[in-house]
Amino acid sequence: MSDRATSTARAPQRTSGRSTPSRTDLRIVQTGKARARSRQLACSLALVVMFSALLASAVFHSVLVAGQQRLDRLDTRVEQRQQLLSRARLRVAELSSPGRVVATAKRRGMVLPDHTTWLAATPPASAPAAPAAGQARPSGSTGNELAGGRGGPAPAGRTARPGRTR
């Protein structure tokens, strides 16, 4: 035999009397493939977010442009309507001018009178004034004599209008 002893038996494992505590601060380290995969996923997500933001911006701008075109069309229509209104007002002013009215009347056979009589409205004859504040009313007076705002009863066929003075 040789100096070396060959044996197929294993050496006994040494165990200490104490147990190994579990360590919570340890973690499994990712391999190179797993790290590359997570980077790829993060880059893909960033590209999708960026593409979505650019697409939303393009849609927003197209909505703005469409709205501005609509406003421009409305401005043009308003301008046209204002010009039409201005021309119509000028036409009304021309047609209702006193010279034009007289000329049209003469053409249709009307003539100017030799003498013009002007009528003026005259206020009705004044009635006795109502008693001043603090003075006694005459007996039989009810205070209704002021109907119509003229100091007497309202004439037949007319009604008193509150708040109107003549």
Image (spheres, rainbow, N blue to C red):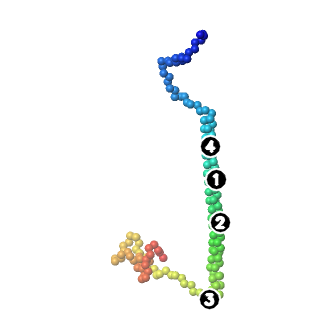
The vertical placement of 42 against 98, above or below, is above
Residue in the foreground of this view, choosing between 129 and 63 = 63
Dot 1 alpha-carbon crowd within 10 angstroms: few under 14, some 14 to 19, many 20 or more:
few
Looking at the picture, how far across and down is residue 159, in whole percent? 43, 78
Query: Pointer 3: what residue?
Result: 110
Query: Pointer 1: what residue?
Result: 58
Q: Residue at x 65, y 70 (%)?
A: 83
Dot 4 alpha-carbon crowd within 10 angstroms: few under 14, some 14 to 19, many 20 or more:
few
Q: Could you tell me the amino acid type at mark 1?
A: Ala
First-in-chain label (2 vs 3): 2
Camera-nearest label, 4 or 1: 4
Dot 3 alpha-carbon crowd within 10 angstroms: few under 14, some 14 to 19, many 20 or more:
few
Looking at the picture, how far across and down is residue 129, in whole percent? 43, 76
In the rendered structure, find residue 106 and report the number of the disc placed on it. Answer: none
Q: Quadrant of the N terminus?
A: top right
Residue in the foreground of this view, choosing between 73 and 165 = 73
Q: Residue at x 46, y 81 (%)?
A: 125
Q: Could you tell me the amino acid type at mark 4?
A: Ser
Q: Element at badge 3?
A: loop
Distance CA(mark 4)–CA(mark 2): 48 Å
Query: Pointer 4: what residue?
Result: 44
Distance CA(mark 4)–CA(mark 3): 93 Å
First-in-chain label (4 vs 1): 4
Camera-nearest label, 2 or 1: 1
Query: Pointer 2: what residue?
Result: 76
